[in-house]
Amino acid sequence: MHELRQAGAKAAQIVADHLEGVGERPVWRPVPDGELSWLTGQELPETGRALEELLEDTRAHVLPYPMGNGHPRFFGWVNSPPNPAGVLIEPLAAALNPSCAGGDHAGPHLERTAVRWLAELVGFPHPPGGGLLTSGASMATVICLATARQRAALADGWDAREEGLSGRPAMVMYATEEGHSCLHKAAQLLGLGARNVRTVPVDAAYRMDAGALRAMIAEDLDAGLRPFCVAASAGTVNSGAVDPLDAIADVAASYGLWFHVDGAYGALGILDDGAAPHYAGLERADSLALDPHKWLGVPVGCGCALLRDPGAARAAFSLVPSYLVDDNAGDLGWFAEYGPEQTRPFRALKTWATLSYLGRSGVKRLVEHTTGLARTLAAMVEEAPDFELLAPVTTSITAFRHTPRTGDLDALNLEALNLAVPGAVQARGNVFLTGTRLGGRAALRACFLHPDTTEQDLELLLEEIRVAAKEL
C-alpha cells in the first residue's frame, strides 16, 4: 500500500496540473509519428513495472494528446469536459470494483437515487425500477427499443424472445433523418432490419412532421406491416432541434405505438426557461434515453434508460440462472433483469457525485449558460455578412455556414469550402469545430457544453473560420 499512497498523491498532482493548464494549450493537435509508434507498438513487458513509471509514461505520452473536449474552445460533436467531482470520485468506484448487477451493497442502492435524480431533472415519470444506468445512450436505446419490440409482440399474442422475428409481419419504427444513428444501429441489432426504419419528413426547423408520421403509419398498416414504435428527438446532434413531442405522442397513442424519446444530448435543455416549451409532451414518452456523460460532464461512459413501465423492460430482458437467484432482491429484482449487461460497473458513484456537486441550480446554470452561448453565436452569425444561420437555436448547438463575399465562389465551391473548413480549423489548434450536413448542404456546427466558454471564444471561433477559409 505504500507504493499506492505515493503514486496516488503523484497521480492527483498530475491530474490537477493537466486540468488547470488545459486552456493554455492547443485545443487539439495530431499525434506525431514517434508518439504514435509508442502508443500503438509497445510489447507487453516481461516483468511488472512500478506505478510511478506508469504515471510518468502517461504524463509524457498520453496527456499531451487529448481529444480536446476538456478545453473551453472545444465546440465539436457532443463531448463535454469532465466534471471535477466525477474525476475525483471515479477512482473510488474502481477501488471497490463491484458488479452492480444487483445485490445488497452500495452500488445498486445508489443507482436508484442517481436514476431518480435524472428523471426528476427532466420531468419524466419514474416509478421505482423504471430506469438504469448504461454505458451510453446507444445501449440505452437498445434497451428501450427491445422493450418496445417485446411489448408489441406480446400484445399480438406471441413472444419475440422465445420465437424470434421470422415469419412475422415486419415491425416498423419511425424516425427522421435528423434522428441519431444509434436508433438505426439498435434497430439493426434487434433484427428489425434497416429498411423497416421509416424516415419521416421534417419541417423547416428540422422537426418531425407529425402529420406525415400519421399518414405513413396508416399506409404501413394498409400494407400489412406492424408499426410498433416512433422515436422522436429531444435535441438532435446536428442542430439541437426538438421534435413536436406532444403532437407525436398524440399520433403514437392513437395507433397504440411505443413512444420513445432520444434525449441523449438534449433532454436537459428542458431546464432552460426559453427552451422548456419545446419539450411539452416529453413526460408522455414510454421511454427516454439520456446521457449524463454529455451535458452534465459525468466522466465517460454513463448513459441512462428511463421507462414508464418497469415491468415491460423486465419482460424483455429478465433471465436469472440458478446461481444468481437472490431471495432478498425484493419485487424489483436486480438491475441485470432490465438490460443485457450482467456485470455492470459502478456508474452511479460518479453520477451521484457530479449531480451532488452541481445541485439542481448548478445544472440549470450550466444549461442556461451554454444555450445562451448558442443563441449569442446565432445572433453574431446573422449579423455577419459572411455567415448564414441554417437552423433555429433551441439547445446549445448552432448550425451555420461560411459564405465569404469574394464574388468568385459558385455553389459547388462554397459547398467544398464548408466541407473543408472544420478540418482546417482543427489543425490550427485554437478552436475545435466539426461539420455535418443539414438540409442537404455542408454545414458547420458548434456545440457548447463547457462552463468556462466565453463570448470572446465565440468571436475567436468566427475569426478562425475566416482565417482557415482564406488559407484554403
Image: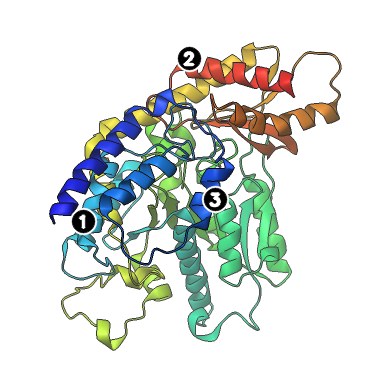
Residue 58, label in figure: none
Residue drawn at 68 percent across, 58 percent down: 198
Element under label 2? helix
Does the residue at mark 1 contact the one at mark 3 (Cβ under 8 Å)? no
Residue located beneath label 2 in the image: 456
Along the line of sight, the residue nearer the viewer: 463 or 399 = 463
User: How many neighbours does mark 1 have within 10 angstroms: few (below 14), some (14-19), or many (20 or more)?
Assistant: some
Element under label 3? helix
Q: In this view, does 237 lie above or below 396?
A: below
Judge whether residue 412 can be spotted in this image.
yes
Please identify the quarter of the rendering in which residue 274 is found.
Answer: top left
Of pointers 2 and 1, the one earlier in the residue sequence:
1
Residue located beneath label 1 in the image: 110
Q: Residue 462: x percent and y percent?
A: 60, 18
Of pointers 2 and 3, the one earlier in the residue sequence:
3
- Distance CA(mark 1)–CA(mark 3): 42 Å
> In screen coordinates, is 284 left or right of 20?
right
Q: Residue 387: x percent and y percent?
A: 68, 19
Judge whether residue 228 can be spotted in this image.
no
For marks 1 and 3, give the one nearer the viewer: 3
Outermost residue toward the front in this view? 46
Outermost residue toward the bottom in this view? 322
- Distance CA(mark 2)–CA(mark 1): 40 Å
User: How many neighbours does mark 2 have within 10 angstroms: few (below 14), some (14-19), or many (20 or more)?
Assistant: few
Q: In this view, does 461 lie above or below 343?
A: above
Question: Which quadrant holds the C terminus?
Answer: top right
Residue located beneath label 3 in the image: 37
Q: Residue 116: x percent and y percent?
A: 27, 51
Residue type indicated by callout 3: Ser
